[in-house]
Structure formats: structure tokens, C-alpha cells
Amino acid sequence: MSDSYHIQGTDADSSAAADPSPNDPSPSDSPANETVRPGETEELTPTIEEIPESQSVIRSEELTVHYGDEQALQPVTVGIPEREVTAIIGPSGCGKSTYLRCLNRMNDMIDAARISGTVRFRGADVYADDVDPVALRRKIGMVFQKPNPFPKSIYDNVAYGLKIQGFDGDMDARVEQALRDAALWDEVKDQLDSSGLDLSGGQQQRLCIARAIAPDPEVVLMDEPASALDPVATAKVEDLIADLSERYTVIIVTHNMQQAARISDKTAVFLTGGQLVEFGDTDQIFENPENQRVEDYITGKFG
Ligand SMILES: Nc1ncnc2c1ncn2[C@@H]1O[C@H](COP(=O)(O)OP(=O)(O)OP(=O)(O)O)[C@@H](O)[C@H]1O
Ligand SMILES: [Mg+2]
């Protein structure tokens, strides 16, 4: 338990790390083409490795989500371990983004979303009435699929969340540190006043990561952060994620199974219907999954 955990902020402005509007990928309209063979639907008991509560920074308990009448998530109970990289994989439309968005209340922005169950961040219920979602999102930052720098200078992009927070320390130092941590400093240190939009796609994504980590979050959520990038930029972002996990808990949605295998410590596999089917050590999930449907998915038999 951290003594410094306060999610009851007073500011009502939006946080840079959580700006949802231009970047939140639209919902999938292509349902997964998973083929369920007769008998497999009977397997209803997911294999979830229990992470002791004391070691999980975020924990969902019986978390379910409906959009209108459609159930997007079956009850999900899982603990996310601290300072590790947890990958979320699964076919399109299986609820990966929905799950991720529940963790820092980004689904609050979606009118049709109805959430039940509990999400705990360091033991505190993030959906409690007295929780300020903006303050929560500073602790649980988010990076989206499409890089979405603000139309501001590189410096101001990174400083944005800190300014909202009323940070009155050494802003230059914080901006530099965030850009260094995002492995971007050397490339931009002489052009901090240039627009963030003039950077390459890969640089923009690292700028967004710098923006998310500048307010010093504890958890960084990433929804397919490298899927719009070329292989070189992807490799940089992957290296960066490995570095980030020394200080932050990283939860990353990816469609790329090699990427999940390369960069994550734990893997959560969601399958069609919004069910978390297996969660465990990444090596075990990829080499020896317990669930037949997970094995079929990982070996490319569907999805
Ligand atoms: N804002 C929304 N309104 C209504 N339905 C939604 C909304 N967002 C997602 N859904 C539905 O919820 C289900 C899960 O969607 P979600 O975007 O979480 O899947 P995903 O696993 O992230 O898919 P993808 O890999 O394509 O990004 C889908 O059936 C989708 O159509
Ligand atoms: Mg998604």
C-alpha cells in the first residue's frame, strides 16, 4: 500500500494523460472470426493464476461491461502485478480495449457503457463516488493506438499534465526527465519549441508516452501503442516498455503475439464473448497454455 496514493483531486480539467477524444479507437465493428468447435463452449472455467492481493497494483473483481444490451465483458477477476509488463491479447472485438478502459475509468466517457463489479487500485475502489477520475488518470495514465500529440510544442505537450496538476517545481527538469525516460530527449532537445505534430509517427508516440509519464503515474495503460508504427519505431517503443517496467506497471493490449511474447512478463488472453480465459506467466501461456482454446488461438487456428 502506498501512503502517497490520493485519487481525490479537486481539479475538474482534463488530464493530458487521459485525453480521450481524438484518439480512442472506435469500437470494433468486425466481430472475431473465431471458430468454436462443438464441445469447446462447455469449457467455462477460466485458468487464472492468482496474484496475491498484496502484489497486485490493480485488481478487478467480477468486472463486467455492457454496451446497451450487448455484454462486452464476462466477469473478469484478476490481479495485475506491480512493475511488470502484462500483455492483453485476443481476437478483435473480444473486449481488450473495454477492459483496459475500465481500469482508469475511460469508459465513463462512453454513454452506453454500463459497468458492474469492482476495480481496485492499491485496494481502493476506483468507482467509488469520492474518486476523481482525472486524478485517477494521473496515477493510471494511458497511451493510445494512434499517436495523438496536442497541437502544441513538444515542451508543452509534456508539461501539460503537470501544469494542470499545479506543479510548481522545476518544470524544465521534469520535462527533460520524461523525454529521457521516453527515449526521445536526444532527438528533440534542440527543438523543444517545435510542434509535437511535426515529429515522425514513432517520435509522436514516444512524445505521448513522455506526456503520460510526466505526472509520475504508477500504471501506464497502452492500447496497441505500436500498431501504427513501422518496425524500427516499433522496436524503439518495445525497448522503451521494457525500461518503463522498472518503474511503472505497464498493461499493454497488442494484436502482435510475438510482441507480447517478447515484452511481457504476464499475459492475459481474452477470447470471443469477452471472457478472460487464461492469465499467467507469458512463457507458460505461449509454450504450454492450459486452455485448449488459448492454444488454438496462439497457434493461429483462429483469430
Ligand atoms: N463505445 C461502444 N459502444 C458500443 N459497443 C462497443 C463500444 N466499444 C466497444 N463495443 C463493443 O464491445 C465489444 C468489445 O470491444 P473492444 O473494442 O473492447 O474489443 P477489442 O478486443 O479491443 O477489439 P480490437 O482488437 O478490434 O480493438 C465489441 O463487440 C464492440 O463492438
Ligand atoms: Mg481494441
Image (cartoon, helix red, strand yellow):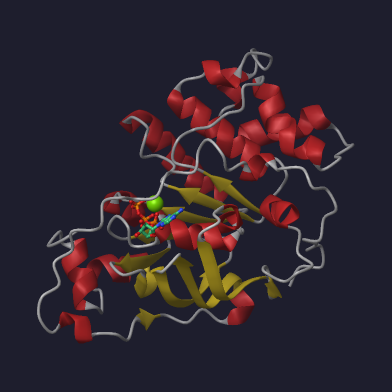
Q: Is 69 situated left or right of 181 in this image?
A: left
- Expressed as whole percent of the image width and height from the top left, the position of residue 35 reads 13, 67
Q: Is residue 181 visible?
A: no
Q: Residue at x 56, y 82 (%)?
A: 52
Residue furthest out toward the left: 38
- Expressed as whole percent of the image width and height from the top left, the position of residue 119 reads 60, 72
Residue furthest out toward the front: 69
Asked if 36 appears above or below 253 in the picture, the reply is: below
> Depth check: 91 or 21 in front?
21
Q: Quadrant of ligand 1?
A: bottom left
- Expressed as whole percent of the image width and height from the top left, the position of residue 175 reads 72, 31
For the C terminus, the quadrant is bottom left
Asked if 230 appears above or below 23 in the picture, the reply is: above
> Where is residue 236, by image quadrant?
top left
> Depth check: 115 or 247 in front?
115
For the N terminus, the quadrant is bottom right
Q: Residue at x 69, y 55 (%)?
A: 139
Q: Is 202 situated left or right of 117 in this image?
A: left
Q: Residue at x 57, y 35 (%)?
A: 208
Q: Is 145 situated left or right of 17 in this image?
A: left
